[in-house]
Each structure stands twice: as C-alpha cells, then as structure tokens.
Image (cartoon, grey):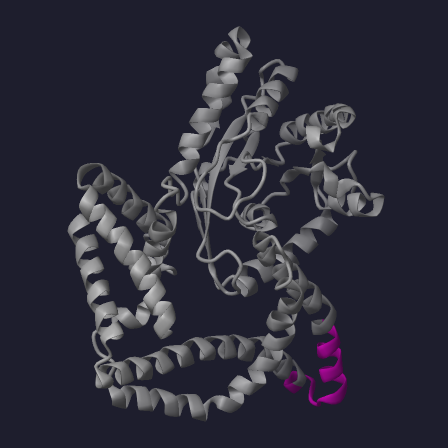
Amino acid sequence: MGRKNIEEYSVGYSILKGIFGFWHNNVYYRKVIVLGRENINPEDHIIYAPNHQNALMDALAVLFTNKGQPIFLARADIFRKKFIASILYYFKMLPVYRIRDGFSTLKENDETFSKTIDVIRNRNGLVILPEGDHAGFRRLRQLKKGICRIAFQADEAEGFNLKIKIIPVGLEFTHYSRFRQVLTVVYGKPIDTSQYHDLYRESPEKALIELRNRLSSEMKKLMVHIDSQEDYEAIDELRTMINGRFSDNIRLPKLFRDRILIEKLNKLKSNIQSVYQRICSLSTQIKDKSKELNLDYRLLEKKKHPFLWLVAGMLGMILTLPLFIYGSIFNIIFIYLPDIKIRKMKDIQFQSTFRYGISLAIALVLLPLILILLLVSVSPWWLALLAFISLPLSGLFAWNYVLVFKRIAGGFRIWKYRREERKDYIDLKRNYEELRTLITQLT
C-alpha cells in the first residue's frame, strides 16, 4: 500500500487498525462516547472536519470511531524521509505542502489533489483538520479555506456530480494528556456542498467564505467553545467543578452540559456583569485554594465524610494492597515508563500522542513475549492463560486503587481540617457552596 493506490482497501491496514483501535478505545481511554454515527452515509462522498486541539489524537479519534479506511491530509514536512513517508502512506496519509515548506514545493500539491479526487470518488472518506494546526485551547479558531477549496475543486473536476458532503466533527477530551480519560466524538449533520455550486460558479471566493463560515458555525455546535480569552481559565475550570461528575454519562455527555453552562454564562455576561464576574472570580479562587489544600472538587461536593467510612475504606485498601502491587507491574511498564520520555517534551499537546504510541509499542513487543513465557513455564496451559489475562485486569484495578486511595486520603484531610476549624478550608467550602448556588440559579 503506497501513495499511488492509497484509496484501495488494505487487509493488513484493517488488521492493524483493529489492534491499535482496541488499545485506543479500551485501554488508553477508559471510555469513548460516540454520537451522530447515523449522520454518516457510506454511499456519500464525504470529507470529515474535526476540531484540532490534541495533536495526532484528534485524527485517531476519527479513525477509531469510523468503520471505514479514511485518508488523512497531514503537513508535508513529516514526509521528508523516504522511509517515514512510506510508513505514512501505508497508514493512509497524504502530504499537504505550505508556503513555509518552500514556494517551489507547492506544485507537489497537484499530485495530492489528484489523489484526493480518487479518495473521494472511491468513498473512503477524506479527513481534513480545517484549523490547520493544533492548539491546546477549547476554542474553535479561524478555519483555513483549504478544506472548502478541495471540496469545490474535487467536485468541479468531476463535473459537479459528486455532491460532496462535509461532516463537522466535535472532539472533547476530559484531559488532553492523562491516561484513562474520556473521549467524546460527535459527528454532525453533513453539509451538502452542492448548495453552493451556483455561487461557486459565479464567485469562487464568496463560495469559499460562505461555506467556511457555515462549517465553522456547525463545528462550534458540536464541541466545547470558550470564546472569552480574558476569562478562559476560569470558565474552563468551572466545567470541571460543576460537570466533572458527569464525565462518563452517555445519555447527556459532559460535552453538552459544558456547552449549556457556557451559553448561560455568555448570556449572564451580557445581562448581569457583576454576577458573571463573581462566578469567574470564585472559580479561580476555588481552583487555587483546592490545589493548595490538596483537595479535588468531588470531595468538596460531599456534605459529609464519616470517619468510620473512611477507616473502613482504608482497611479495604490495606487488604487489597497485594493485588495493587501485582497490578502496578503492568502500569509501571505500560503507563509510567513512557512518562520518562514524555515529560521532556516542549509541546505538551504531543504528550498524549507519544504516551499512546509508546505504550502501544511496548505492548506489541512485551505482551506476546510474556504470553509465550507463561505458556512455557506454567502448566496447565489454561492457568498460564489466566495469569496472562490477570495482568491487564490487575493493572486496571491498580489504576482505580490509586484514585480511591486519593479520595479516602482526601476525606481524612477534610476531616482533619474540620476538626481544626481551619479558616482557609472553611472559606473554600463557603466559596464552593456560593458558586454552586449561583450556577443553580442560572439553570
């Protein structure tokens, strides 16, 4: 599989996609919520347009929630080495050259454009990240015209018979770089580019602008979009304080709860500026003080932290400590080992990409070796198989063990603060209750 036949179905690619996708959807993320799949008609000529905030993980989010073998457009500089380029072509990626790559290289886009027509005609699905580059902010930036130009020119080359559909895609990560987070992918209703054909024939530039604006508007409906730059950090943190407990909710995902919250805050800012500023101020104060007192928002939500329950929880931790130690072997190898390399990265948006990639590479090498060693050294074979299966399961237990331990430790901490009547904790709790009251009044 190379550049010339990139649009053709590949059995080998399909097998790798299944393996990589399993690690992505079931191990790296604790939950992947997918909405709007009914908007994808495999008989349509489709271009997917996701927001771009988390480097390569944005592309993988579309790939591993899509049944087909879509083709991705990527920046050309990563194709410079022939060996790397051959791998990228195998993984169905095509280069896009920019002025920064050298003006003379722009003519290379003609060949890429020719292949995009083959891809669209073949109904593979073409994935273009219309913001151009990634940025770690929950905000949709100005879209590039390239995605609209490709759609129009590809349709024009086929006599305007393809009737290309652009599907806006909203991506939301509960945390950009942490392991075992929740990923939400929302496929929006397709935009039929044929609606703009008459305008394109009359004025291509106007058609490009109108389609781009329409796409931008539709994408914002499917993602968390915090327009305010001045109060961005306060609003972004507020989402976790108020809606954090709904991260795993499928019926009404946190993404849409966050959107409702932000919309109400925007209206409040226009109508009652003083209350809006108070909410943002409280959000910032609670964030800073919670960090200082080493308390998470789930602990602040609870009205009571019974001492006997905390003691019982700690006894449970002690009794299951051997299982935690056993499971930690798996986590140290596949989760914490990649962190040694990742912590040195300057672009933190690539941390998740490398954490996923390195952990997957280690798994592909070590897990088969571990299975073989167990089958050779342990008898009967089913006992060896059980031991092998126990590794990832105990690793998952160990991961949750740490989370529960932190909650119990935090409960003891709060119990201690209350007993000592610490003023900073009392102020924090009062501010938190005031914030929740103000938010409740909004809804």
Give the residue drawn at x 32%, y 69%: 298
Boundaries of the magenta span = 368-383
Determine which quarter of the picture holds residue 404: bottom left
Give the residue drawn at x 65%, y 75%: 333
Q: Is 419 situated above or below 371? A: below
Looking at the magenta stretch, what is its main secondary structure? helix
Q: Is 255 situated above or below 128? A: below
Give the residue drawn at x 68%, y 68%: 363
- 381 and 297: which is toward the camera: 297
Q: Is residue 98 visible?
A: no
- Residue furthest top as drawn: 202
Q: Residue 340 location in percent, x, y?
A: 65, 69
Q: Residue 429 location in percent, x, y?
A: 23, 69
- Residue furthest right as drawn: 82
- 117 and 339: which is toward the camera: 339
Relative to 351, is 251 on the left or the right?
left
Q: Residue 96 location in percent, x, y?
A: 69, 33
Q: Is residue 299 magenta?
A: no
Relative to 398, is 369 on the left or the right?
right
Relative to 101, is 211 on the left or the right?
left
- 252 and 292: which is toward the camera: 292
Q: Is 314 situated above or below 118? A: below
Determine which quarter of the picture holds residue 6: top right
- 38 and 217: which is toward the camera: 217
